[in-house]
Amino acid sequence: MSEVRELAGRAQKAAVALANTSTDQRNRALLAMAHALVSRQDEILEANARDMEAARVKNTGASLLDRLELNPMRIKAISEALKSLSVLPDPIGEVVSGGRLGNGIWLQQVRVPIGVVAIIYEARPNVTADAAGLCIKTGNAVVLRGGSLAVESNLAITKVLAAAAVGAGLPEGCIASVSSTDREAAEELMRLHGVIDVLIPRGGAGLIRSVVENATVPVIETGTGNCHIYVHESADPRMAERIVVNAKCQRPGVCNAAETLLIDESIHEVVLPPILRALEQAGVTVHADDKTRALGAIMRVVPATEEDWATEYLDLQIACKVVAGLDEAIAHINTYGTKHSEAIVTEEYSAAVRFLNEVDAAAVYVNASTRFTDGGEFGLGAEIGISTQKLHARGPMGLAALTTTKYVAMGSGQIRE
C-alpha cells in the first residue's frame, strides 16, 4: 500500500471517531497542540534550518525565503493562532433550520464535519498548523501535502501536532502529512475518490490549475488574485490615492493585493499623476497603457502588454489603464479578473450599486482597500483559504466552510403511505 493511501485510510477511520468528539475535547486538543509547538520548537527550527539551507542552494528568491523561514516569534504566533481557534464558537451541531412536519416528524438540518479534508499547498510551513487546527476544530481528519521547499518543516510540525492531538484523546491518524514530494503522490491524493471527501489547493496558479484539472475528488478552488482598483470620475482624489497605495503596497505578495489600477479618462490627467508618484515613491513599477505613459508623471514605468492585464504580480508592480467609464471598467474586470476581490472608489451611489451588482467576484468593495479580504478581517477568526468558486463556499473560508449539513429526522413510528 502506498504512503498516500495508507495515510488517507487512517484518516478515514479517524474521521468517524472525530465525529463523536465533543467541543471541549477538540478545544483541549487545540490547546495541547499550541503548547507543543512552543515546547518542541527546537526540533521544528532544526528542520526549518535544513529547508532554508536547501532553498538557498537552489537560489530561492528573498520573498519565498521569507515565507519559508521560522523563528521563535513566528512559532509563537502560530501557537497563538491555535489558541484563538479554541475559543471560537463551534459550528458542529448548529441547527441551520428545523421544525415539525405535518406528519409529526421533527426534522432538523444540522452542521456536521465533512470527514477527510486533504490540502495541497506550497512553501509556507505555517499553513501546516493553520490547516490542522481548523480541521480539528471542525471535527475533520486532515491529510496534508506540502511543497518540497518546506518538506522538513512541514513533517516536523505535523509530528508535533499529531502527537499532541492524540495525547489529548483524539484518534490516531487525525493529522497526517505526506512525506513524498513527488508529483505522483499529489496526483494519487487527488484521485482517492470515496476516501478523501474534499481537496483544497493553496498556492499559485499552476498548482490550482493542476488540482482542478486532475482531481476526481470534490475540490474547493482557492484562486489567484488579479485584483483591481477602479477610480471612478466622482472619486475623492485623496481617498483614491490612499486606497490604491495601500492595496498595492501594504503587503504586495499576497492574493488580495491590487494588481491593476483602472481610472476614468475624464479625470486621469489631474487625479492619476499624484497616484503614480505615490506608487513610484513606494518602489512600484507601473505597467502603463499609452494614455498613462503620455502623462510623463514618473520614471519607473514600462509599456503594458496584453499579458499584463491578466498578471498576478505578487510584487511591487502594477498595471494601469485609462478607461472610458464604468462600462469599460466593469467589462475589463470581468474579462481579466480572477473573481477574487475588486474595488471601486466613487462618490456616486448609482455607480457603486452597478459595480457591486455587475462585477463577478467573491468580494467587492466600495471606497475600501482589497486588502481586507481575509478571514480574520472579516470576523471569521481564521481561514483555510479564499475560495473564488461559487459552490459551497466563496470568499474567505472560515470554520463553517469546513462543514456540511445532515438532515436529522425524529419520528414516533411514522411510515409513508
Image (spheres, helix red, strand yellow):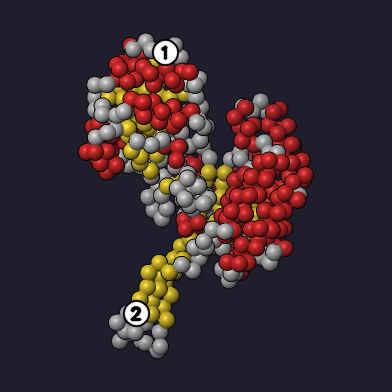
Amino acid tagged 1: Ile
**How far across and how far down the image is residue 192, in percent?**
55, 56
Who's the residue at 77% across and 44% down the image? 42
Amino acid tagged 2: Arg
Asked which secondary structure carries label 2, the reply is strand
The answer to whether one can see residue 253 in this image is: yes
Residue 413 vs 168, above or below: the answer is below
Please report whichever mark, 2 or 1, sits nearer to the chain's N-terminal start: 2
> In the orientation shown, which residue stands out farthest toward the left?
350
Where on the picture, by quarter, is residue 108? Answer: bottom left
Q: Quadrant of the N terminus?
A: bottom right
Where on the picture, by quarter, is residue 23? Answer: bottom right
Residue 412 vs 176, above or below: the answer is below
- The alpha-carbon separation of the residues under discs 2 and 1 comes to 68 Å
**How far across and how far down the image is residue 177, in percent?**
65, 51
**How far across and how far down the image is residue 261, in percent?**
37, 27
The answer to whether one can see residue 144 in this image is: no
Count every numbered label the image shows and give the total.
2
| Residue position for label 2 | 100
Residue 25 vs 226, above or below: the answer is below
Who's the residue at 51% across and 32% down the image? 251
> In the orientation shown, which residue stands out farthest toward the bottom?
413
How crowded is the residue under tag 1: few (<14 C-alpha within 10 Å), some, or many (20+)?
some
Residue 195 placement, left or right of 416 = right
What's the mark number on residue 258? none
Who's the residue at 41% across and 55% down the image? 392
Who's the residue at 42% across and 47% down the image? 395
Q: Quadrant of the C terminus?
A: bottom left
Q: Nearer the viewer, residue 11 or 130?
A: 130
Asked which secondary structure carries label 1, the reply is loop
| Residue position for label 1 | 298
Residue 383 placement, left or right of 320 = right
